[in-house]
Image (cartoon, rainbow, N blue to C red):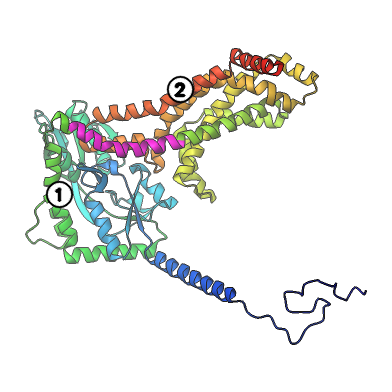
Amino acid sequence: MSASQPIAGAPAAQDGRMPSGGANPTCRRAPKPCHGIARGILLFLVAGCSFHARAGAQTTPLRWGGDAEGGAPYQFQDPRDPGRIIGFEVEIADAVARILGRPAEFVQNQWDGLVPGLERGNYDMIISGLEITPDRAEVIAFSRPYYITFEQVAVRKGNESIRSLEDCTGKTVGTLKGSLAQRILEARPGIDVRSYDGQVNAYEDLMNGRLDAVLMDHIIALYNVAPQPGLKMVGRPEGRLEYGIGIRKEDTRLLAEVNRALGEMISSGELRSILERWGIWTELCGDYFLDHSPGNQRPVAFEDYLAARQASRSVWDRIRQYASYLPLLGKGAVVTLELSALAMVLAVCLGLLLALTRLHAPAALRLLCGAYIELIRGTPLLIQLFLIFYGLPHAGIRLSPMLAAILGLALNYSAYEAENYRAGIQSIPRTQMEAALALGMTRIQALRYVIVPQAVRLVIPPMTNDFIALLKDSSLVSVITMVELTKSYSQLASIHYDYLGIGLLAAAMYFLIGLPFVRLARQAERYFSPEHRAFLVGGKQRQAGE
């Protein structure tokens, strides 16, 4: 039989041709019904994906950055519902997004990091009481002003020695860091200026007698002096400042759209209505908006804020209020635990690799690892987080806030873990390595089965201490837009001026997070102890003898 002839009993080819290779002109491949169905499903999915892509492009959220810890009336957590962010700037952002046909999305960021966050691309614009100043205008673009106000001096009610800014010479005056008020104070000789990251703490220090006066925006003074019976505002208005929406310089199209939206809000009276509801309409706003008509809007939002701040609460009311904080604090605690655990696992693995490299690698690698460890241990964690999150994008590397936080903590603590492991490995007698090599083990096998397990037992206590320290150092990641437990606490405390009760609640959560790991470390320490290992080996030997 020739090779070209079909084998008896062999099935015909499925493509409709004769097995011998000769084409059968009368046999055509019939289209299968399932092919048409599959083709139809594929076309439907492609059409659906393109539709959703177009819809997603049209409804891309307008992401705006702000700091909810800044306090009322900018953007802050609702005293009656801590899970909700309210404020006059929240309403302005929602109105601008509505006019542009996009949903608004708030992005939390620490106030002094708002401009770097904008440049990094974390959000599309900034709405957070950002003053239009020449130095900021060199870095970012500003919309037309949406609010105009002035600076106001506040003192304790019993203080009659300060009646204006001129009387502050020789006094200690607090203000907001990086603000126009700070520049005004620093330009006057003889004033001891103390700057604060948040507005609430300055008025707290004024109440407690640590400051003689506070100079901040009138809008801030209004919302911090009115609820405090022991404070008052004195003196005439100082300076003039304008709040604008910050946008990246290259986003010229968005800038034009935002200016158009603000123009519509001014001409329709919506912007004035928002400002009047919060009780912050000023004559300066009337001059700029060309609107000197008498106001007809009650400051209902301002009155509601005062009622929430001044309401007397019983013990049970306070307990229920603390209970309402638990979901928000719990959410922050989950973020803290997640990034701390992941960072510690990565730090331990990298630290062990660094320690082994520094002890057993060639000289060049040993020198490189030593330089890395000393560099990391010799620089602050905060600077390292800034470099990773805000510096790397200039080199084309953009990391998410969570990934940047984990990487920053892991790289920092890996240097300390490397030293722990180096000390643990060097504490093992050299005879252990020599005996392992004499038994025919390679150096890697000796490290894996003999040296490192013993070193692990020795470094468990310092490693546990490092994890507890890392858990607390995770509070620094709030500077890169992460909202963890400490940030949640500071936001809640700034609303209710309750740093004691909420602080104790947050401290208890930190304690509960760290306690299980301390217990696990003690169990691991007992498990790796020589007595326990000898007991296990003896038990196995007895079982083998039986």
Magenta segment range?
A: 318-339
Of 373 and 508, nearer the camera is 508
**For the C terminus, which image quadrant?**
top right
Please name the residue shown 42% across and 26% down the image.
514
Q: Amino acid at mark 1?
A: Ala
Q: Residue furthest front?
A: 9
Q: Secondary structure at mark 2?
A: helix
Q: Please state which of the two labelled residues, at mark 2 or mark 1, is closer to the viewer.
A: 2
Q: Residue furthest bottom?
A: 26
Q: Which residue is mark 1?
A: 301
**For the N terminus, which image quadrant?**
bottom right
Q: What main secondary structure does the magenta stretch of the protein show?
A: helix
Q: Is residue 115 left or right of residue 365?
A: left
Q: Is residue 401 left or right of residue 68?
A: right
Q: Amino acid at mark 2?
A: Val
Q: Position of residue 241 (x, y in %)?
A: 23, 50
Of 452 and 220, nearer the camera is 452
Q: Which mark is residue 518?
A: 2
Relative vertical location of residue 257 with respect to residue 496 in this rendering, above or below: below
Relative vertical location of residue 280 with respect to residue 20 in this rendering, above or below: above
- Tag count in the figure? 2
Of labels 2 and 1, earlier in sequence is 1
Please name the residue shown 15% across and 28% down the image.
315
Relative vertical location of residue 249 with respect to residue 445 in this rendering, above or below: below
Report how far apart the C-alphas of labels 2 and 1 lie in the structure: 47 Å
Q: Secondary structure at mark 1?
A: helix
Q: Position of residue 230 (x, y in %)?
A: 11, 31
Report which quarter residue 446 is drawn in. Answer: top right
- Say whether residue 338 is magenta: yes
